[in-house]
Structure formats: C-alpha cells, structure tokens
Image (spheres, helix red, strand yellow):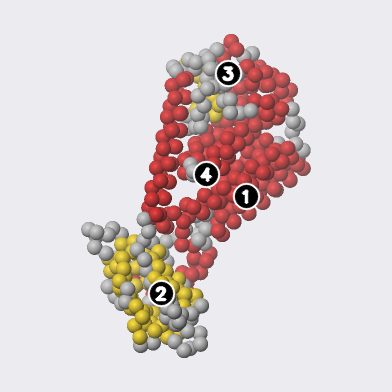
Amino acid sequence: MISNFLQPAILACLVISGLTVLILLVRNPLRKLAGASIAYQLWAVLPLSLLAMFLPHRQFLDFADKSMAPANQLISGTTLLEIQPASTWPIILVSVWLIGSLCLLGLLGMQHLHFLRRLGKLTESEGVYLASDVDTGPALTGCFRPKIIVPADFYERYSEAERALIIRHELVHKGRGDVIANILFALLQCLFWFNPLVHVAARCFRLDQELACDASVIAQEPQARRTYAEAMLKTQLSLTPSALACHWPSRHPLKERIMQLQQNNPSKLKRVLAYAVLSCLCSVSAYSAWAATPVSSVAAPIQTGQDADKSEVGSYSVAMDIKVAGIKSSPRVVVKQGTPAAIGIQSEDGQAKWDFSFTLTPAPADKYKNSVVIDMIVKKGDEVIAKPKLITGLGQQAKLQKETPDKQQDFDIAMTANLVK
C-alpha cells in the first residue's frame, strides 16, 4: 500500500516541478501580450494536470478485456520470479513526507490565526469591516463568507474615490473566489513542502492574482489609474501576512503593480491568441501528466469474464514481470488463496520449458499485517531450480532473482499481489 502511494506521489511532484518551470517562463510574456488576467489564469495548468493524473487509462480498460488469463494458462516466451521482503524505506519516506506536510500546515494555520488576532474587534460599516489596527488591511478573508477588512482609519486615510476603488478591488477577489484559490495553493505547498519550486510558485501566484485584480478594476475605471496608484501608496503594508487571505502585504512588489496600471487593455486579437496559447498549454500539460501516470497507480485490480466468478474474499490479483533468457513477459492472474496456480513458459528456441507453481495464503495477522505468504516451486524441465517461501505486503512489489555462472538457470521475477474485493 505504501509503495502504491509513493510512486504516484513522486510522479506528481515531478509533474508539478516541470509545470512550475513552464509557467514561470511563460507568465511574463503572456502578461505583456494579453494582460495580467490571462497570466493569472495560466496557473490553472497545475490543478488540471494533477486531476488528469487520476483519470482512467485506456490501456487499463483494454487490458481488462483480454489479459487476465487463468493461472494455469501456458504463457510462451519467458520465466518466473523470486522475491525479497518489502523495504522499510518507502515507509520512512512517506512518514517524513507526511510529518513535513502537517508541520507546514500547522505553521500556515498559526500564521493565519495571528493575522486574525491583529485585526482585533471588527466593526461593520457600509458593507466593510473596520479592523482595530490601522496597519492591517485592506484584505479579504473567510472561505465561505468572505469579509472585506479595512484599516481602522479607512475613512480618514483614503478619499472617497480611493475607498471605492479599494472596495471594488476586494469585490473582484470575492467574485473570483480567490480566497479558496489561496487555500488550495497553500495545501499544495504543504503537500510538496520539500520542493522549493512550489514555494517560488506560491509567491508568483499571489502576485499574479493581485495584478489580475488590479487590471480588472482599471478595466472598469480606466480614468482612475492615478487615484488607484495613490491608494496603493497610502496603504500601510501588513507585517503579519496570511497565505489564506487576499491582502496587500509587502511581498507584493508595489512598483511592479503601479507600473502595470499604465498598460492599456490588449486588443481582441491578442486576447484570442493568448487564450489559444493557454488552451494548448492546458491540454498538452494535462495529457502529458495523464500519459505519464502508470496504469497501476490510478486503477484498482481488474476483474473480467472468468475472473468475475473468482472475485470473492480470499482471491488475489497477481501482477508479474518476468525475465528469462533475454525474454520479458508480464502475465496477470487471479488466484484463490490456498489453491496452487501453475504457469508454464517455453523458451523461444524451444529447448527449455520453465514451470512455476505458487500458492498464496494470508500471513499470520499477529506478526504481519496486510501481508501474504508465497510458496513457490520453480522448475526447468524436470529439474527443480528453486523452492522459495517468502512473505510480502499486499500491494508491495516482491522480487526473486537467480544467477548462475553458465547463465542457463537465470531468472528475474517481480510480483505484486492485491486482495480482490
């Protein structure tokens, strides 16, 4: 089970890293071409590609129609297996991974609580909430019922026009669901806490979010650029930012935001071209992530035809990868616990026939949890080559190898057994 989690998790980390590099390279040219909003939408590539990794594979469906052969079927072309106990390294890696994720999640949670405490007692006024602190806000916080938070001296510090622009800015955040987007990205940071690219991406994501919000406000009020810039300059930057709220902290380069206000709205042709590029990037990235995901990591054990009758408690789905005499084979079988299964393999030159029989039984539950005992006999012709007996965890790959000086009795087998439900 741990191995089944670790492989797709590492693949997801590689996918996130590759896509982050791509986005960081493309976001600035795309913003110059078609504006800040399209650059912010580019970040949708990440969740779409992650979701694509969990979509069912066509190969899996085709395999289910024809490849689950009975265990006693003769398979021509290869050899069978030897197995080693499951390594403890996957358990250690997953434990460290989860501990790091929980630690970062707790840190972000405490940071957000500190941010909320700085707000003090909130006073509602004309649809916004005045904080007790003059150094906190403007901000939008709250997942299901977002509130617009403004500093205590909001009505004294800003002019009427500036107040209207600030409120409109926060309303754009609210309408787009940016608080939820921030929460999801924070969870992505927690999940891949060890990947520095994810933390760089988080900072750039929130900057693009603010630039897109600024662009949306200016698109509605194109004559208010100077007033909007003055409102930014008057804002006291919060010293206690939160990754789970939308606000104007010092991490957002003020100079870049003010310079972005000077850009004119892109033409319709540029927007169409930018959306075409964005659609291609999303499609190619999602498909690549889906295609790179191994079938075994996104799908459950397969049941078809004859196997459906055996799909009861006490049956095992067994996936094998066999190498012998330079030949490879990947048989898949379903066997009932305690019932011997036999596979015969004929070498390509017809000179040697390999036979393997194996029996799967549950391992003692008091000593080995979620494990299976494999009793096996490997024969070449009439000669018994090996009689291994080993224990391996369900869902974990076990390996059996043998090498001889003359290479005549070599075999290399990997086996993964899962309980059929």
Q: Do the residues labelled 2 and 3 touch (CB within 8 Å)?
A: no
The crowd level at tag 1 (other Cα within 10 Å; few <14, some 14-19, many 20+) is many
Q: Name the residue under label 3.
A: 236
Q: Residues within 10 Å of mark 3 (few under 14, many from 20)?
A: some
Q: How crowded is mark 2: few (under 14 residues within 10 Å), some or many (20 or more)?
A: some
Separation (CA) of disc 3 from disc 1: 38 Å
Query: In screen coordinates, is 199 left or right of 64?
Result: right
In three-dimensional space, the C-alpha distance between marks 4 and 3, rounded to whole angstroms, equals: 32 Å
Mark 2 vs 4: CB contact within 8 A? no
Q: Which amino acid does label 2 sit on?
A: Lys
Judge whether 156 appears above or below 310 on screen. above
Q: Which of marks 4 and 3 is nearer the N terminus?
A: 4
Among numbered discs 3 and 1, the one appearing first in the sequence: 3
Tally the numbered discs.
Answer: 4
Marks 3 & 1, CB-CB < 8 Å contact: no
Question: In which quadrant of the rendered image does the C terminus lie?
Answer: bottom left
Which of the two discs, 2 and 1, labels the residue nearer the N terminus?
1
Camera-near label (2 vs 1) is 2
- Residue 248 as seen in the image, left or right of residue 257: left
Q: Residue at x 52, y 39 (%)?
A: 185
Q: Is residue 332 visible?
A: no
Q: Give the number of the disc on residue 195.
A: 4
